[in-house]
Amino acid sequence: MAKTIRVLVVDDSAVVRKVFTEQLSREKDIQVIGTAPDPYVARDKIVRLKPDVITLDIEMPRMDGITFLKKLMHYYPLPVIIVSSLTTKGSKLALEALTIGALEVLSKPTSAYSVDDMGVQLGDKIRAVAGARVKPTALGTHAAPGVQDLSSRALARTTNKVIAVGASTGGTEAIKNVLTRLPGNAPGVVVVQHMPAGFTRSFAQRLDSLCAMGVKEAEDGDTVANGRVLIAPGNHHMLLKRSGARYYVQVKKGPLVHHQRPAVDVLFKSVAQSAGANALGIILTGMGRDGAAGLLTMKQAGAVNIAQDEDSCVVFGMPKEAIRLGGVDHVRDINTIAQKTVSLLR
């Protein structure tokens, strides 16, 4: 019998605490063992109740969620899901929380995003992070490893190549790790990270400030070119297309694939069709099997593919499934994937 996942809900809104508790009570494998209106109450309940997963609001009185998260990740690291408003400030704080060590982000319900939709996603995210590898961090530091520079001359002769990247739980930091290590003239990169609408633009802007390549949230028709990274926008699929020698992306709605939109499989299968042997695929940490079939399709079309290894994954789900299906050529620690990518593309 599967173990019940014990959840503590931390939010200053009594309405949100009530809604989350009611929504999660429908899930047979999830139990809300307590709620807390602020980090001080949460601290005591964490010690006493020992939850498996915490949902955490980041805009709270007395102590803000970011400060609390830093302390939590240092003294008592646990899987944390950030619950954030879709404001500009909320999305930026959510990304800061992911940098500190939170594993997933969820947007609060809006008129366009119903409570029932949120409830389904919350249950999925709780299952994804439960049992994930959460390492303690030093106070005042982030969990991300240091960045190393690769020679900008390494890819000087590379043309008409495309790098396709897919990730889910724990993926924001894994993607940052890879992209910040690529030179500014690397082939165009297309990325799907499972993330709600409203957060991918801030994610792209943050990466743009850190990477040698230019990074933006993709818009329909954007050109894929050397030195450019396109991030699939939340709640939209992204496909690679080709017109003559030009690669570009199509951004569109469509049915959920593996309960996701954007879905990695949708991107990878389009890359196989449009780029074939001119592509390199990378699949990173995440729960489930999204991307596994698409990566195999890419390999069958002539692409070379890399999967993140188990030890460096937060959740070894998507890479494991891709390896099992036979779509992976190389398995690497997250800190060496960029270097391997450059060597394969030379």
Image (spheres, rainbow, N blue to C red):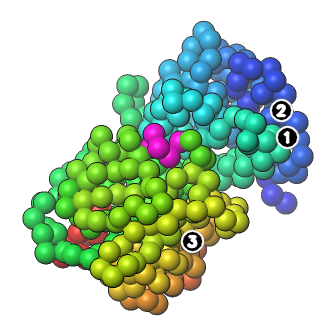
The circle on residue 209 is: none
Frontmost residue, 169 versus 267: 267
Q: Is residue 2 left or right of residue 94?
A: right
Q: Is residue 152 above or below residue 162?
A: above
The circle on residue 266 is: 3
As helix, strand or loop, the secondary structure at mark 2 comes to helix
Mark 2 Cα-neighbour bin, 10 Å: few <14, some 14–19, many ≥20: some
The residue located at (89%, 46%) in the rendering is 26
Quadrant of image for the N terminus: bottom right
Frontmost residue, 318 versus 73: 318
The residue located at (51%, 30%) in the rendering is 88
Considering every residue shown, the one lying at the far top of the view is 62
Residue 32 % position (x, y) = 81, 36
Question: Residue under circle 2?
Answer: 19
The type of residue carrying mark 3 is Val
The type of residue carrying mark 2 is Val
Question: Residue under circle 1?
Answer: 23
Foreground mark, 2 or 3? 3
Specify whether residue 131 is in view: no
Is the residue under label 1 in contact with that under label 2 (CB below 8 Å)? yes
Q: In this view, does 219 lie to the left or right of 109?
A: left
Prevalent SS, magenta region? helix
Q: Is residue 4 left or right of residue 171?
A: right
The residue located at (45%, 39%) in the rendering is 202
As helix, strand or loop, the secondary structure at mark 3 comes to helix
**CA–CA distance in space, label 3 to label 1:** 30 Å
The residue located at (57%, 72%) in the rendering is 265
Quadrant of image for the C terminus: bottom left
